[in-house]
Amino acid sequence: MTNILLITADDMDGNTPGSFGGPKDATPNLDRLAAGGMVFNRAHVPAAVCQPSRSALMTGLWPHRNGAEGFEPIREGIGVINDHLKQAAYKVGILGKVGHIQPVERFGWDMAADMRQLGLGRNPEAYGSLAEDFIANASHEGRPWFLMANAHDPHRPFHGSMAERELWSEAERNEYPEPSKVFVADDVEVPGFLPDLPGVRQEYAEYLSSSRRCDDVVGAVLAALDRTGTAEETLVVFMSDNGMAFPFAKANCYLRSTLTPLIVRWPGVTAPGSSNDDDFISMLDLFPTFCDAAGVAIPDGIDGVSITPLLTGATEQGRNEVFSVFHETSAKQRFEMRCVQDLQYGYIWNGWADGDTKYRAENMWGLTWPAMVEAAPTNEAIRQRADFYLTRAREELYDLSNDPDCLTNLVDSSDLAPVLARKRNSLSRWMRSTGDPMLGEFQSGIGQPNEHAGVHTP
Protein backbone atom coordinates (compact mmCIF):
# COMPACT_ATOMS: atom_id res chain seq x y z
CA MET A 1 0.00 0.00 0.00
CA THR A 2 1.12 3.53 -0.78
CA ASN A 3 1.54 6.24 1.82
CA ILE A 4 -0.33 9.47 1.04
CA LEU A 5 0.95 12.97 1.78
CA LEU A 6 -1.57 15.70 0.96
CA ILE A 7 -0.16 19.22 1.33
CA THR A 8 -2.55 22.16 0.99
CA ALA A 9 -2.11 25.90 0.77
CA ASP A 10 -4.69 28.26 2.19
CA ASP A 11 -5.84 30.78 -0.46
CA MET A 12 -3.04 30.38 -3.03
CA ASP A 13 -3.83 31.49 -6.56
CA GLY A 14 -3.57 28.80 -9.22
CA ASN A 15 -0.97 30.82 -11.14
CA THR A 16 1.32 31.71 -8.21
CA PRO A 17 3.85 28.82 -8.30
CA GLY A 18 6.62 29.30 -10.82
CA SER A 19 5.75 25.94 -12.35
CA PHE A 20 2.29 27.37 -13.16
CA GLY A 21 3.54 30.59 -14.71
CA GLY A 22 4.09 32.60 -11.53
CA PRO A 23 7.19 34.52 -10.47
CA LYS A 24 10.20 32.27 -10.95
CA ASP A 25 11.50 32.90 -7.43
CA ALA A 26 8.18 32.61 -5.60
CA THR A 27 7.99 28.88 -4.86
CA PRO A 28 11.28 26.97 -5.27
CA ASN A 29 10.14 23.95 -3.26
CA LEU A 30 6.90 23.57 -5.18
CA ASP A 31 8.81 23.94 -8.43
CA ARG A 32 11.14 21.10 -7.40
CA LEU A 33 8.14 18.96 -6.50
CA ALA A 34 6.61 19.73 -9.90
CA ALA A 35 9.86 18.78 -11.64
CA GLY A 36 9.65 15.39 -9.98
CA GLY A 37 6.00 14.75 -10.79
CA MET A 38 3.05 15.91 -12.86
CA VAL A 39 1.32 19.29 -12.92
CA PHE A 40 -2.32 19.77 -13.89
CA ASN A 41 -3.02 23.13 -15.48
CA ARG A 42 -6.81 22.79 -15.51
CA ALA A 43 -7.51 21.62 -11.97
CA HIS A 44 -10.31 23.27 -10.00
CA VAL A 45 -11.75 23.16 -6.52
CA PRO A 46 -15.52 22.59 -6.24
CA ALA A 47 -16.13 25.72 -4.16
CA ALA A 48 -13.78 28.67 -3.68
CA VAL A 49 -13.91 28.98 0.09
CA CYS A 50 -12.06 27.01 2.73
CA GLN A 51 -14.43 24.73 4.64
CA PRO A 52 -16.74 23.76 1.75
CA SER A 53 -13.69 23.10 -0.47
CA ARG A 54 -11.99 20.89 2.11
CA SER A 55 -15.18 19.11 3.10
CA ALA A 56 -15.88 18.29 -0.55
CA LEU A 57 -12.36 16.94 -0.95
CA MET A 58 -12.64 14.70 2.11
CA THR A 59 -16.11 13.38 1.26
CA GLY A 60 -15.91 13.21 -2.54
CA LEU A 61 -19.29 14.97 -2.63
CA TRP A 62 -20.52 18.38 -3.73
CA PRO A 63 -21.27 20.77 -0.84
CA HIS A 64 -25.02 20.56 -1.41
CA ARG A 65 -24.71 16.77 -1.12
CA ASN A 66 -22.48 16.57 1.96
CA GLY A 67 -24.14 19.40 3.88
CA ALA A 68 -21.10 21.69 4.28
CA GLU A 69 -22.22 24.52 1.98
CA GLY A 70 -20.63 27.08 4.28
CA PHE A 71 -18.82 26.94 7.59
CA GLU A 72 -20.83 24.09 9.04
CA PRO A 73 -20.19 20.35 9.56
CA ILE A 74 -20.93 17.66 7.04
CA ARG A 75 -24.25 15.91 7.55
CA GLU A 76 -24.50 12.86 9.79
CA GLY A 77 -23.95 9.62 7.91
CA ILE A 78 -21.71 11.11 5.21
CA GLY A 79 -18.62 9.00 4.58
CA VAL A 80 -15.11 10.46 4.63
CA ILE A 81 -11.86 9.26 3.07
CA ASN A 82 -10.44 8.47 6.52
CA ASP A 83 -13.10 5.75 6.96
CA HIS A 84 -11.74 3.79 4.01
CA LEU A 85 -8.10 4.36 4.82
CA LYS A 86 -8.48 3.30 8.44
CA GLN A 87 -10.17 0.09 7.29
CA ALA A 88 -6.94 -0.61 5.43
CA ALA A 89 -4.93 -0.01 8.65
CA TYR A 90 -3.74 3.46 7.65
CA LYS A 91 -2.55 5.80 10.38
CA VAL A 92 -4.16 9.20 9.70
CA GLY A 93 -2.87 12.59 10.78
CA ILE A 94 -3.52 16.27 10.18
CA LEU A 95 -1.40 19.39 10.62
CA GLY A 96 -3.28 22.70 10.62
CA LYS A 97 -6.84 23.67 9.63
CA VAL A 98 -8.18 20.93 11.90
CA GLY A 99 -11.44 22.75 12.59
CA HIS A 100 -12.10 23.44 8.92
CA ILE A 101 -13.43 19.95 8.30
CA GLN A 102 -16.16 19.19 10.80
CA PRO A 103 -17.25 17.57 12.97
CA VAL A 104 -13.60 17.05 13.92
CA GLU A 105 -14.30 13.82 15.78
CA ARG A 106 -15.92 12.36 12.66
CA PHE A 107 -12.51 12.09 11.00
CA GLY A 108 -10.91 9.98 13.73
CA TRP A 109 -7.45 11.47 13.46
CA ASP A 110 -4.67 9.47 15.10
CA MET A 111 -2.67 12.70 15.32
CA ALA A 112 -3.93 16.27 15.06
CA ALA A 113 -1.96 19.48 15.56
CA ASP A 114 -3.64 22.82 15.02
CA MET A 115 -2.33 26.31 14.31
CA ARG A 116 -1.20 27.12 17.86
CA GLN A 117 1.16 24.11 17.76
CA LEU A 118 2.41 25.21 14.35
CA GLY A 119 3.37 28.83 14.96
CA LEU A 120 -0.08 30.08 13.98
CA GLY A 121 0.13 27.68 11.04
CA ARG A 122 3.15 29.56 9.68
CA ASN A 123 6.24 27.88 11.17
CA PRO A 124 7.95 25.54 8.68
CA GLU A 125 10.16 23.97 11.35
CA ALA A 126 7.14 22.96 13.42
CA TYR A 127 5.47 21.38 10.40
CA GLY A 128 8.63 19.46 9.51
CA SER A 129 9.19 18.18 13.05
CA LEU A 130 5.62 17.00 13.60
CA ALA A 131 5.44 15.44 10.13
CA GLU A 132 8.65 13.51 10.75
CA ASP A 133 7.41 12.25 14.12
CA PHE A 134 4.11 11.11 12.64
CA ILE A 135 5.74 9.29 9.71
CA ALA A 136 8.37 7.68 11.94
CA ASN A 137 5.70 6.44 14.36
CA ALA A 138 3.65 4.94 11.54
CA SER A 139 6.75 3.24 10.14
CA HIS A 140 7.62 1.88 13.60
CA GLU A 141 4.11 0.40 13.79
CA GLY A 142 4.47 -1.08 10.32
CA ARG A 143 1.44 0.85 9.05
CA PRO A 144 0.85 2.87 5.90
CA TRP A 145 -0.11 6.46 6.58
CA PHE A 146 -2.11 9.42 5.34
CA LEU A 147 -0.97 12.88 6.40
CA MET A 148 -2.86 16.05 5.53
CA ALA A 149 -0.44 18.94 6.04
CA ASN A 150 -2.31 22.24 5.79
CA ALA A 151 -0.28 25.46 5.65
CA HIS A 152 -2.17 28.52 6.91
CA ASP A 153 -0.29 30.75 4.46
CA PRO A 154 -1.02 32.64 2.27
CA HIS A 155 -4.32 33.29 4.04
CA ARG A 156 -4.79 36.79 5.40
CA PRO A 157 -3.27 38.53 7.29
CA PHE A 158 -0.43 38.73 4.79
CA HIS A 159 3.18 38.97 5.84
CA GLY A 160 4.20 42.51 6.79
CA SER A 161 0.67 43.89 6.56
CA MET A 162 -0.95 46.28 8.99
CA ALA A 163 -3.63 43.62 9.53
CA GLU A 164 -0.98 41.18 10.74
CA ARG A 165 0.27 43.66 13.33
CA GLU A 166 -3.25 44.46 14.45
CA LEU A 167 -4.40 40.85 14.73
CA TRP A 168 -1.46 39.29 16.54
CA SER A 169 0.79 40.55 19.31
CA GLU A 170 4.55 40.78 18.89
CA ALA A 171 4.94 37.63 20.98
CA GLU A 172 2.55 35.78 18.68
CA ARG A 173 4.34 37.04 15.58
CA ASN A 174 7.60 35.73 17.04
CA GLU A 175 6.17 32.21 16.90
CA TYR A 176 6.84 32.05 13.17
CA PRO A 177 9.71 33.25 10.97
CA GLU A 178 9.80 35.66 8.10
CA PRO A 179 9.46 34.07 4.67
CA SER A 180 12.74 32.96 3.12
CA LYS A 181 12.13 35.71 0.55
CA VAL A 182 10.16 38.91 1.07
CA PHE A 183 8.66 40.60 -1.98
CA VAL A 184 8.32 44.36 -2.36
CA ALA A 185 5.82 46.33 -4.40
CA ASP A 186 8.30 47.49 -7.02
CA ASP A 187 9.23 43.90 -7.90
CA VAL A 188 5.80 42.43 -8.62
CA GLU A 189 3.49 42.27 -11.61
CA VAL A 190 -0.15 42.64 -10.60
CA PRO A 191 -2.45 39.91 -11.99
CA GLY A 192 -4.50 41.08 -14.96
CA PHE A 193 -7.86 40.70 -13.24
CA LEU A 194 -6.88 43.45 -10.77
CA PRO A 195 -6.07 47.12 -11.50
CA ASP A 196 -2.44 48.13 -11.09
CA LEU A 197 -2.81 50.62 -8.24
CA PRO A 198 -0.27 51.30 -5.47
CA GLY A 199 -2.44 49.69 -2.80
CA VAL A 200 -3.06 46.63 -4.96
CA ARG A 201 0.62 46.31 -5.79
CA GLN A 202 1.56 46.57 -2.10
CA GLU A 203 -0.97 43.95 -1.04
CA TYR A 204 0.00 41.58 -3.84
CA ALA A 205 3.64 41.79 -2.72
CA GLU A 206 2.55 40.92 0.83
CA TYR A 207 0.54 38.01 -0.55
CA LEU A 208 3.57 36.72 -2.49
CA SER A 209 5.68 36.90 0.66
CA SER A 210 3.11 34.78 2.49
CA SER A 211 3.05 32.39 -0.48
CA ARG A 212 6.81 32.03 -0.17
CA ARG A 213 6.43 31.04 3.49
CA CYS A 214 3.83 28.48 2.44
CA ASP A 215 6.48 27.17 0.08
CA ASP A 216 8.88 27.06 3.04
CA VAL A 217 6.36 24.82 4.83
CA VAL A 218 6.18 22.57 1.78
CA GLY A 219 9.97 22.30 1.76
CA ALA A 220 10.08 21.42 5.46
CA VAL A 221 7.45 18.68 5.11
CA LEU A 222 9.12 17.19 2.04
CA ALA A 223 12.48 17.25 3.82
CA ALA A 224 10.90 15.35 6.71
CA LEU A 225 9.57 12.80 4.24
CA ASP A 226 13.06 12.35 2.82
CA ARG A 227 14.61 11.95 6.27
CA THR A 228 12.24 9.09 7.09
CA GLY A 229 13.29 7.22 3.94
CA THR A 230 9.69 6.76 2.79
CA ALA A 231 9.56 9.13 -0.19
CA GLU A 232 9.67 6.33 -2.77
CA GLU A 233 6.60 4.69 -1.25
CA THR A 234 4.60 7.91 -0.93
CA LEU A 235 2.06 9.62 -3.18
CA VAL A 236 2.54 13.38 -2.70
CA VAL A 237 -0.23 15.79 -3.71
CA PHE A 238 -0.12 19.57 -3.44
CA MET A 239 -3.11 21.87 -4.00
CA SER A 240 -4.69 25.09 -2.79
CA ASP A 241 -8.17 25.12 -1.30
CA ASN A 242 -9.20 28.15 -3.40
CA GLY A 243 -7.91 31.27 -5.09
CA MET A 244 -6.28 34.20 -3.34
CA ALA A 245 -8.34 36.45 -1.09
CA PHE A 246 -8.67 39.37 -3.53
CA PRO A 247 -11.70 40.70 -5.42
CA PHE A 248 -12.74 38.55 -8.40
CA ALA A 249 -10.94 35.53 -6.88
CA LYS A 250 -11.77 33.74 -3.61
CA ALA A 251 -15.44 33.34 -2.70
CA ASN A 252 -16.59 33.58 -6.32
CA CYS A 253 -16.83 31.37 -9.41
CA TYR A 254 -14.35 33.06 -11.73
CA LEU A 255 -11.44 31.24 -13.36
CA ARG A 256 -9.05 32.56 -10.71
CA SER A 257 -11.52 31.66 -7.96
CA THR A 258 -11.36 27.90 -8.39
CA LEU A 259 -8.19 27.24 -10.39
CA THR A 260 -5.78 25.33 -8.13
CA PRO A 261 -2.08 24.51 -8.68
CA LEU A 262 -2.36 20.73 -8.53
CA ILE A 263 0.93 18.82 -8.38
CA VAL A 264 1.10 15.02 -8.08
CA ARG A 265 4.26 13.02 -7.51
CA TRP A 266 3.74 9.26 -7.35
CA PRO A 267 7.00 7.34 -7.79
CA GLY A 268 6.64 4.65 -10.42
CA VAL A 269 3.39 6.18 -11.70
CA THR A 270 3.93 9.82 -12.67
CA ALA A 271 6.70 10.75 -15.09
CA PRO A 272 9.03 13.44 -13.68
CA GLY A 273 8.49 16.84 -15.23
CA SER A 274 5.24 15.86 -16.94
CA SER A 275 2.11 17.99 -17.32
CA ASN A 276 -1.52 17.67 -18.26
CA ASP A 277 -2.74 20.78 -20.04
CA ASP A 278 -6.13 19.80 -21.43
CA ASP A 279 -8.05 17.59 -19.00
CA PHE A 280 -10.27 19.27 -16.43
CA ILE A 281 -9.81 17.93 -12.92
CA SER A 282 -12.00 18.53 -9.87
CA MET A 283 -10.58 18.12 -6.39
CA LEU A 284 -13.53 15.80 -5.83
CA ASP A 285 -11.43 13.41 -7.92
CA LEU A 286 -8.79 13.07 -5.21
CA PHE A 287 -11.04 10.92 -2.98
CA PRO A 288 -11.23 8.00 -5.45
CA THR A 289 -7.59 8.53 -6.42
CA PHE A 290 -6.57 8.05 -2.79
CA CYS A 291 -8.69 4.90 -2.70
CA ASP A 292 -6.70 3.62 -5.70
CA ALA A 293 -3.43 4.40 -3.96
CA ALA A 294 -4.54 2.59 -0.82
CA GLY A 295 -5.88 -0.41 -2.71
CA VAL A 296 -9.39 -0.03 -1.33
CA ALA A 297 -12.67 -0.08 -3.20
CA ILE A 298 -14.07 3.26 -4.37
CA PRO A 299 -17.47 3.67 -2.68
CA ASP A 300 -20.60 3.99 -4.77
CA GLY A 301 -22.29 7.35 -5.06
CA ILE A 302 -19.37 9.75 -4.78
CA ASP A 303 -19.08 12.61 -7.25
CA GLY A 304 -15.37 12.38 -8.05
CA VAL A 305 -13.68 10.21 -10.69
CA SER A 306 -10.17 8.85 -10.09
CA ILE A 307 -7.36 10.54 -12.00
CA THR A 308 -5.09 7.49 -11.70
CA PRO A 309 -5.21 6.80 -15.48
CA LEU A 310 -4.19 10.41 -16.20
CA LEU A 311 -1.22 10.07 -13.86
CA THR A 312 0.20 7.39 -16.12
CA GLY A 313 -0.15 9.64 -19.18
CA ALA A 314 -3.34 8.03 -20.46
CA THR A 315 -6.28 10.04 -21.78
CA GLU A 316 -9.89 9.93 -20.62
CA GLN A 317 -13.21 10.90 -22.11
CA GLY A 318 -15.53 13.27 -20.25
CA ARG A 319 -12.95 15.75 -18.99
CA ASN A 320 -13.76 18.57 -21.37
CA GLU A 321 -15.44 20.81 -18.78
CA VAL A 322 -15.60 21.44 -15.05
CA PHE A 323 -18.28 22.74 -12.69
CA SER A 324 -18.02 24.83 -9.55
CA VAL A 325 -20.37 26.33 -6.99
CA PHE A 326 -20.55 28.98 -4.32
CA HIS A 327 -23.06 29.18 -1.50
CA GLU A 328 -22.01 31.12 1.56
CA THR A 329 -19.29 33.46 2.83
CA SER A 330 -17.42 33.10 6.12
CA ALA A 331 -19.85 35.69 7.50
CA LYS A 332 -22.70 33.32 6.53
CA GLN A 333 -24.12 35.55 3.83
CA ARG A 334 -25.63 33.59 0.94
CA PHE A 335 -24.55 34.38 -2.61
CA GLU A 336 -25.60 31.41 -4.72
CA MET A 337 -23.43 31.00 -7.82
CA ARG A 338 -22.87 28.18 -10.32
CA CYS A 339 -20.26 27.91 -13.05
CA VAL A 340 -19.31 25.67 -15.96
CA GLN A 341 -16.03 26.12 -17.83
CA ASP A 342 -14.42 24.46 -20.81
CA LEU A 343 -11.25 25.15 -22.79
CA GLN A 344 -12.73 28.32 -24.30
CA TYR A 345 -15.77 29.59 -22.42
CA GLY A 346 -16.79 30.15 -18.83
CA TYR A 347 -20.43 30.66 -17.83
CA ILE A 348 -21.54 31.87 -14.39
CA TRP A 349 -25.06 32.06 -13.02
CA ASN A 350 -25.48 34.45 -10.09
CA GLY A 351 -28.67 33.37 -8.41
CA TRP A 352 -28.40 36.20 -5.89
CA ALA A 353 -28.00 39.06 -8.37
CA ASP A 354 -31.20 41.13 -8.41
CA GLY A 355 -29.81 44.62 -9.07
CA ASP A 356 -30.13 45.65 -5.42
CA THR A 357 -28.33 43.06 -3.31
CA LYS A 358 -24.67 43.94 -2.79
CA TYR A 359 -21.94 41.35 -2.56
CA ARG A 360 -19.63 41.39 0.45
CA ALA A 361 -16.89 38.92 1.39
CA GLU A 362 -13.48 38.71 3.04
CA ASN A 363 -11.72 39.19 -0.30
CA MET A 364 -12.67 42.88 0.11
CA TRP A 365 -10.66 43.29 3.33
CA GLY A 366 -7.20 44.77 3.26
CA LEU A 367 -5.78 47.21 0.70
CA THR A 368 -7.05 46.17 -2.73
CA TRP A 369 -10.78 46.84 -2.56
CA PRO A 370 -10.37 50.21 -0.79
CA ALA A 371 -7.80 51.17 -3.44
CA MET A 372 -10.33 50.37 -6.16
CA VAL A 373 -13.05 52.34 -4.40
CA GLU A 374 -10.73 55.33 -3.95
CA ALA A 375 -9.71 55.29 -7.62
CA ALA A 376 -13.24 54.85 -8.97
CA PRO A 377 -14.36 58.52 -9.02
CA THR A 378 -11.51 59.50 -11.35
CA ASN A 379 -11.13 56.26 -13.32
CA GLU A 380 -14.20 55.18 -15.27
CA ALA A 381 -12.92 51.68 -16.01
CA ILE A 382 -12.25 50.97 -12.34
CA ARG A 383 -15.59 52.51 -11.37
CA GLN A 384 -17.44 50.19 -13.73
CA ARG A 385 -15.43 47.20 -12.51
CA ALA A 386 -16.12 48.00 -8.86
CA ASP A 387 -19.83 48.65 -9.47
CA PHE A 388 -20.12 45.36 -11.33
CA TYR A 389 -18.41 43.47 -8.53
CA LEU A 390 -20.96 44.70 -6.02
CA THR A 391 -24.13 43.76 -7.90
CA ARG A 392 -23.04 41.54 -10.85
CA ALA A 393 -25.29 40.37 -13.63
CA ARG A 394 -27.63 37.42 -13.43
CA GLU A 395 -25.46 35.66 -16.03
CA GLU A 396 -21.84 36.07 -17.08
CA LEU A 397 -20.13 34.59 -20.15
CA TYR A 398 -16.40 34.89 -20.82
CA ASP A 399 -14.16 33.88 -23.68
CA LEU A 400 -11.44 32.40 -21.48
CA SER A 401 -9.09 31.70 -24.36
CA ASN A 402 -8.89 35.44 -25.12
CA ASP A 403 -9.98 36.91 -21.79
CA PRO A 404 -8.74 34.66 -18.96
CA ASP A 405 -9.03 37.59 -16.53
CA CYS A 406 -12.81 37.68 -17.13
CA LEU A 407 -12.91 41.40 -17.86
CA THR A 408 -15.59 41.44 -20.58
CA ASN A 409 -18.98 39.87 -19.98
CA LEU A 410 -20.23 38.60 -23.36
CA VAL A 411 -23.60 37.32 -22.21
CA ASP A 412 -25.47 39.79 -24.44
CA SER A 413 -23.39 39.07 -27.56
CA SER A 414 -25.71 37.85 -30.31
CA ASP A 415 -22.80 36.01 -31.94
CA LEU A 416 -22.41 33.87 -28.82
CA ALA A 417 -26.09 33.08 -28.33
CA PRO A 418 -25.53 29.40 -29.30
CA VAL A 419 -22.66 29.17 -26.81
CA LEU A 420 -24.82 30.67 -24.08
CA ALA A 421 -27.60 28.21 -24.82
CA ARG A 422 -25.20 25.26 -24.63
CA LYS A 423 -23.74 26.45 -21.34
CA ARG A 424 -27.15 26.98 -19.82
CA ASN A 425 -28.12 23.50 -20.90
CA SER A 426 -24.93 21.91 -19.61
CA LEU A 427 -25.32 23.56 -16.22
CA SER A 428 -28.97 22.58 -16.03
CA ARG A 429 -28.12 18.93 -16.68
CA TRP A 430 -25.39 18.98 -14.06
CA MET A 431 -27.66 20.60 -11.48
CA ARG A 432 -30.29 17.96 -12.10
CA SER A 433 -27.79 15.09 -11.93
CA THR A 434 -26.43 16.26 -8.56
CA GLY A 435 -29.77 17.20 -7.03
CA ASP A 436 -28.87 20.88 -6.80
CA PRO A 437 -31.73 22.57 -4.88
CA MET A 438 -31.29 25.74 -6.95
CA LEU A 439 -32.24 24.01 -10.21
CA GLY A 440 -35.80 25.31 -10.23
CA GLU A 441 -34.75 28.89 -9.64
CA PHE A 442 -32.07 28.61 -12.31
CA GLN A 443 -34.48 27.30 -14.94
CA SER A 444 -37.24 29.75 -14.10
CA GLY A 445 -34.80 32.63 -14.33
CA ILE A 446 -33.36 31.81 -17.74
CA GLY A 447 -36.11 29.78 -19.37
CA GLN A 448 -36.09 26.01 -19.84
CA PRO A 449 -32.83 24.97 -21.55
CA ASN A 450 -32.88 22.66 -24.54
CA GLU A 451 -32.37 19.23 -23.02
CA HIS A 452 -31.27 17.75 -26.33
CA ALA A 453 -28.44 20.13 -27.16
CA GLY A 454 -25.25 18.35 -28.19
CA VAL A 455 -23.17 18.94 -25.07
CA HIS A 456 -21.22 16.66 -22.73
CA THR A 457 -23.21 15.29 -19.83
CA PRO A 458 -21.17 14.54 -16.71
Image (spheres, rainbow, N blue to C red):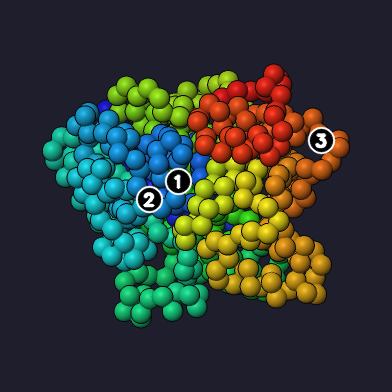
* Residue 201 visible in rendering: no
- Quarter-of-image position of residue 213: bottom left
Pointer 3 and pointer 1: residues touching (CB < 8 Å)?
A: no
> CA separation, marks 2 and 3?
39 Å
Pointer 2 and pointer 3: residues touching (CB < 8 Å)?
A: no
Please state, as top left, top right, bottom left or bottom right, where the N terminus lies in the image.
Answer: top left
Give the residue at the far left of this rendering: 141
Image coords of residue 3 (percent x, y):
29, 35
Please state, as top left, top right, bottom left or bottom right, where the C terminus lies in the image.
Answer: top right
> For the residue marked with disc 1, what is the amino acid?
Glu
> CA separation, marks 2 and 1?
7 Å
Residue 81 shown left or right of residue 14 in the figure: left
**Residue 69 tag number:** 1
313 and 149: which is toward the camera:
149
Residue 99 shown left or right of residue 49 in the figure: left
Q: Residues within 10 Å of mark 2 (few under 14, many from 20)?
A: some
> For the residue marked with disc 2, what is the amino acid?
Glu
The residue that disc 2 covers is: 72
Q: Residue at position x 64%, y 23% from top?
A: 456
- Quarter-of-image position of residue 190: bottom right
The residue that disc 3 covers is: 416
Pointer 2 and pointer 1: residues touching (CB < 8 Å)?
A: yes
127 and 171: which is toward the camera:
171
291 and 333: which is toward the camera:
333
> For the residue marked with disc 3, what is the amino acid?
Leu
Name the N-terminal-most of marks 2 and 3.
Answer: 2
Image coords of residue 26 (percent x, y):
53, 58
Which callout, 2 or 3, points to the residue nearer the camera? 2
